[in-house]
Image (cartoon, coloured by chain):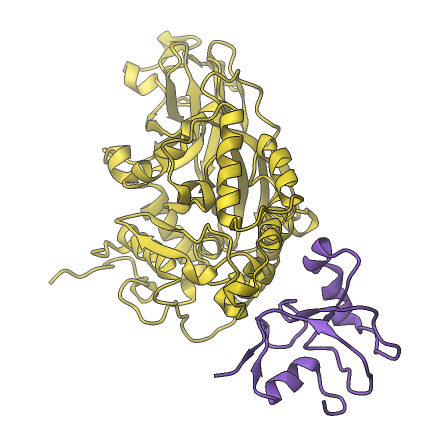
Amino acid sequence: MHDGETLMAAAERSGYRWPTVCGGLAECGTCAVRIVGAAPDGLPPPAAPEADRLATLPDRKLHPDAGFRLACQLRPAAVDGLVVHKKGVRPAR
Amino acid sequence: MTVIGERTGLERTMAFGADVIPRERFTSVAFLELEYERLWGRVWQIACRLEEIPNPGDFVEYTIGDRSALVVRDATGAVNAFANTCPHRGTRLGDGCGSFRGEIRCRFHGWRWDLEGNNTFILDDHEFPPMTDEETALAPLTVDTWGGFVFIHFGADPEPLLDFLAPIPALMDPYRPERMRYTGLKRTIMPANWKVVIDAFNEGYHLSATHPELLQWKDDAALEYEVYATHTRYGGAGEPKPSPRLGIDPSEVDQTELLARKIQDLIDNLPGYFGPDDLAALGEVARTPLPEDVTAGDYYLNRRRTGAVARGLDWTHLSDEQVLGGDDVLMFPSVLGPAVAGGWFLYRCRPNGMDPNSSIFELWTLDERTVDAPETPMPEVQVFPDPKAHDWGLIVNQDVDNFEAIQTGLRVPGRGLHWNRRQEMGVRRFHEVLDRYLFDAPT
C-alpha cells in the first residue's frame, strides 16, 4: 500500500474490482469491510463522513460486536496487522 | 395528417416521440392548468376506499385543483358521487370527511338532499322561477369501484372503469385488494411536482444510488418492466439475492445472513410493508439460522405460506413470485406502489392547487384480512406539515430527501432530460399516456 492511499484504491491499483455504488464518496456503504480480530493500534479513526455512514450501516445489526470501516476512506498504510473480511472483491476484467 | 397537440400552445412540452424531455412539464403553471382541464377533468381517479365510508351518510370529499367531489354512501349501501357544490348559490357542502345525518344540508340557506342527491327541501320554493328536479338535484358524477377503491370521473360518458383499468384487475385481483384494509394513511405536502413523485416510485433504476443498502439482498438488475395501454408494472426479483453490481459470487453468499438482511430491512426500514400479523413471525425468521442446503428464498417462501395458513389466509392460488416479490403497479395517473401477498404499499400523489412545484402526497398501507374478519374502525389520517420532519422509515425517507433537490434542479434552465430505455420505460409510458390526454398523442 502507498502512503495516504485508501484500501479500495490500493485494491483497484492492484487489479481488483471493489464493490461500490457511490464510487468512493462514503455515501453508499457498499465498500464496507468487517475487521477480523482486534483492530491494530494506530489505525486512524473514521472521520466525519465515514463515521456518519458507519453509524447506520445495516451490517452492524448482523454483527453487533464487529468493527466496520469503509474501504473507500480507510488509509491503513502505516499500520501492520490489519485483517479485514469483504465479499465481492474480484480481479478486474 | 393528424396534427397532435393543436390549440394548446404547449406542443413544445410533449414527451411523446421526444428523445429529450422538456423540463417545463414539471415546472410550468400553464402545463399544470392544461393537466387540470385535459387530464383530471377526463380521467378515472381513485377518490377513496370503501372502508372510509362504511355506513349510510358517511362521506369523503375528494379534491383535485378547483374540482371537489362528494363521495357518499346511501341508505341502500350504494356509493354515489356528486359535485360538491350547492345548486342554489354554489356553497361547498361537505368538508374533508364525516357523516351526514340522513340528509345533506347546505349551511347557507338550508336546502336539503337525500343521499342519492335528490332535493328534498327548498325554503320558500314557490318564490323561485320554475326549476326542474334535475336542476335542484346535486350534480351526479360517475362513480364505480374495483378492489375496494372508489373511482370517480368528472367528465361526460367515461369509458367503463374496467376497460380503463385493464390489465390491473387481472394482475392484482389475486392479491384480493377488496379484502385489504388500511393499517395507515399518511398525508403531507411534497416540495416537488406530482409527476416527479410518481416518476420516482415508478422505476428501480434509482435503487443503487438512493437505497444502496437494498442491493445486499435485492437483485435490482433482475427487475422486469412492463407497460400497458394506460398503466405500468415492474416486479420480479423476489428471490433474495445480492445485486450483481456488488460482484458477490453465489458461493460466497451466507443464506441465513441474506434472508435476515431482507426481512430486517423491510421490517425496520419500510414500516407498513408487512401487516402486524406478518411482522411477529418474520422477525423470528430473521433471527433463526437456516437449515443446511436451504436457500433463503425457499425458506422465506415456505415461512410466508405457512404463516398465511396459520392466519386463515388462502394464498394457494398465488404464485411463488407473488408471495416473494410481488408486483409494483402504477394505476394511472396518481396511485402506485408494490403489492406482495398479504398487503399493498401505495403512494398517491396529485397536484397542489396552482403550484407546479409542490404536490399532495399520501402513503397508504393496506393489509389483507380474512374473509370473515370483523370490520374495525380505520386508522386516523395522519397529516404532516413538513415531510422531512417525519420519519417515514429509512427507505421512504431516502426518497423524500430527494424530492426538493429534484424539483429545484428541474427549475434551473437547462437542456432536456433523458430516460433509460429499459428501467425507466414505465416513466416514459406514464408521460406518453399523459400526452394522450393533454395533446391527443396517438399512443
Quadrant for the C terminus of chain B, please.
bottom left
Q: Picture coordinates of residue B187 (x, y %)? A: 58, 40
Q: Residue at x 47, y 83 (%)?
A: A93
What chain is the yellow one? Answer: B
Vertical placement of residue B99 versus B419, above or below:
above
Quadrant for the N terminus of chain B, please.
bottom left
Q: Residue at x 37, y 32 (%)?
A: B151
What chain is the purple one? Answer: A
| Res B84 visible | no
Q: Residue at x 61, y 34 (%)?
A: B281
Q: Picture coordinates of residue A8 (x, y %)? A: 65, 80
Vertical placement of residue B262 versus B187, above or below:
below
Q: Picture coordinates of residue B437 (x, y %)? A: 29, 50
* Front residue of B200 and B58: B200
Q: Is residue B229 left or right of residue B216?
A: left
* Front residue of B105 and B313: B313
| Res B233 visible | yes
